[in-house]
């Protein structure tokens, strides 16, 4: 039922439907409050103790910011920079906040995205609903810079620069703020961030300055049960029809990616951050089950030899990374 309601609302947000028109006064109120909060933040202009880069979005749902965070961590490491990551830790239930996420923890304690980031990047990860508290904890590792996974609207968090990630297919939908539209803040917020990263779109066609195109390139298929890794060509030669499982903000993107590789996909979409059970992936037949890396940290133990994890890698121009780290290390502010 929850998934059906989500699809119904998203159809209104990203289509031409007027089914949520009665909610527009509430959207105008949300937009007004968002502007006031941003103005108050700009007036205070707090300076972070170390360079802080916020990677977020102004729309509800998945845009591809997590692969970008992973790519930024890898680029920072190549430059000899020590990074710490901070996150809200949605769905996490640690003994206390702030909490340092380590690779041996469970998703129930650490949250699915923070745990996946800790395992994939190898950098210190700290979570707290109040991200400024997570930042304070992250300073204990003496980082050269801190990257916040999400938090664009968390104005208690000081920052040096901001990146807003936007789905290149869905863009801003109907352009309205919640609840009548998908925006957390008015569209003009994109004029104020340092960079707009367009996931799957053409930067030259975007109306915002400093827009950069990002593509998510296919990585490998990994079978946790046997630690087998296959390239795309090897996997598609072995399998033609698969179950696709995704509990992310925009699961259709994941299913479409698998389809473009030549696979026949039987889609199984769940709400974002869904707490999987063994029954959820006890799928009929013998076809392989393919899921995202974020979902795998929650249910990899149930997959067995039918289960595969598909990874993607964010690809962006080298000049973008140079610009980001130059801006951060020279002390420019958002």
Image (cartoon, rainbow, N blue to C red):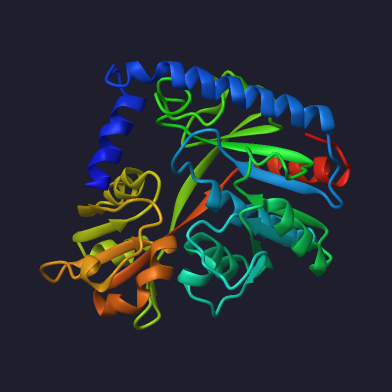
The residue located at (84%, 39%) in the rendering is 46
User: Which quarter of the picture shows residue 211?
Assistant: top right
Res 206 visible = no
User: Which quarter of the picture shows residue 84?
Assistant: bottom right
Residue 68: percent from the left, percent from the top? 58, 49
Closer to us: 39 or 273: 39
The residue located at (46%, 50%) in the rendering is 217
Q: Quadrant of the C terminus?
A: top right
Number of disc labels: 0
| In the image: residue 34, left or right of residue 141 | left
User: Which quarter of the picture shows residue 277?
Assistant: bottom left
The residue located at (57%, 76%) in the rendering is 103
| In the image: residue 311, left or right of residue 42 | left
Please say if 264 is above or below 163: below
Residue 15: percent from the left, percent from the top? 31, 23
Res 182 visible = yes
């Amino acid at each position: 039922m929850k998934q059906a309601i989500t699809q119904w609302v998203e159809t209104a947000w990203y289509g031409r439907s007027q089914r949520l028109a009665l909610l527009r006064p509430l959207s105008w109120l949300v937009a007004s409050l968002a502007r006031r909060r941003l103005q108050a933040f700009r007036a205070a202009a707090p300076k972070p103790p170390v360079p802080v880069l916020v990677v977020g979005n102004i729309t509800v749902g998945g845009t591809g910011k997590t692969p970008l965070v992973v790519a930024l961590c890898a680029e920072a490491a190549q430059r000899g920079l020590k990074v710490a990551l901070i996150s809200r830790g949605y769905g996490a239930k640690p003994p206390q906040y702030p909490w340092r996420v380590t690779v041996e923890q469970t998703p129930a304690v650490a949250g699915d995205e923070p745990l996946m980031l800790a395992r994939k990047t190898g950098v210190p990860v700290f979570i707290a609903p109040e991200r400024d508290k997570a930042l304070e904890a992250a300073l204990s590792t003496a980082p050269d810079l801190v990257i916040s996974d999400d938090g664009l609207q968390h104005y208690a968090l000081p920052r040096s620069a901001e990146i807003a990630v936007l789905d290149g297919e869905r863009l801003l939908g109907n352009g309205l703020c919640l609840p009548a539209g998908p925006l957390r803040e008015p569209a003009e917020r994109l004029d104020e961030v340092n960079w707009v990263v367009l996931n799957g779109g053409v930067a030259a066609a975007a109306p915002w300055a400093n827009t950069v195109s990002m593509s998510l390139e296919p990585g490998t298929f990994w079978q946790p049960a046997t630690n087998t890794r296959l390239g795309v060509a090897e996997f598609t030669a072995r399998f033609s029809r698969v179950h696709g499982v995704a509990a992310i903000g925009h699961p259709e993107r994941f299913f479409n990616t698998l389809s473009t590789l030549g696979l026949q996909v039987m889609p199984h979409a769940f709400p974002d951050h869904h707490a999987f059970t063994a029954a959820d992936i006890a799928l009929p037949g013998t076809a392989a089950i393919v899921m995202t890396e974020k979902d795998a940290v929650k249910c990899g133990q149930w997959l067995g030899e039918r289960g595969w994890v598909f990874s993607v890698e964010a690809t962006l121009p080298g000049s973008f990374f140079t610009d980001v780290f130059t801006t951060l290390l020279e002390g420019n502010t958002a």
